[in-house]
Image: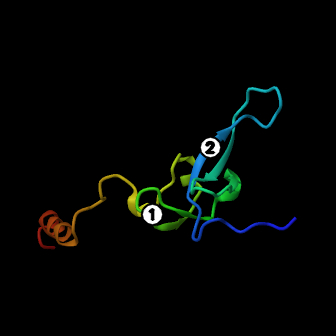
Amino acid sequence: MARTKNNHSGPHKYMRVELKSRIKGSYGEPYIVFRCMIPGCSHYVARELVVGNESECWRCGDAFQMTTALTYLKKPHCVSCTKGKPKSGPSVEDVSANLDKLLGGI
């Protein structure tokens, strides 16, 4: 049987889905897969195999590569869409001014 091409152009839009445990009759950990949420696409991939695949960002729609850290998110997004405060440290001028004060012009 021939494999069919995606029903869409571009990368898949993955969402994390928990399936029942692979071991019949056990109440162990669920089996984690990523499903493409684009209508008409029936693509599924295991969590271990999704790392490195190209995905569409849930927030901005741009393409990005999946990393191990992103496999824990329900709806993975690119690094540029990550919430949080920008990490801004002191400027070089501030550091040099403080060093001059501390060293007293040595």
Q: Which residue is mark 1?
A: 61
Q: Position of residue 92 (x, y in %)?
A: 22, 71
According to the image, label 2 marks what residue? 17
Element under disc 1: loop
Q: Toward which corner of the image does residue 19 lie, by quadrant?
A: top right
Spot occupied by residue 33 in the image (x, y as percentages of width and height): 67, 48
* In the displayed structure image, the side of residue 50 where residue 25 appears, left or right: right
> Considering only order in the chain, which callout, 1 or 2, is on the residue closer to the N terminus?
2
**Does dot 2 land on a helix, a strand or a loop?**
strand
Q: CA distance from mark 2 to mark 1?
A: 20 Å
Instruction: Specify the amino acid type for callout 1.
Output: Gly
Quadrant in the picture for the N terminus? bottom right
Q: Amino acid at mark 2?
A: Val
User: Residue 47: percent from the left, percent from the top?
Assistant: 67, 51
Quarter of the image with the C terminus is bottom left
- Residue at (70% x, 57% y) in the render: 49
| Relative to 92, residue 83 above or below | above
Going by the image, does 53 lie left or right of 56? right
Q: Is residue 80 left or right of residue 90?
A: right
Q: Residue 94 at what x, y percent from top left?
A: 17, 67
Q: Residue at x 52, y 63 (%)?
A: 56
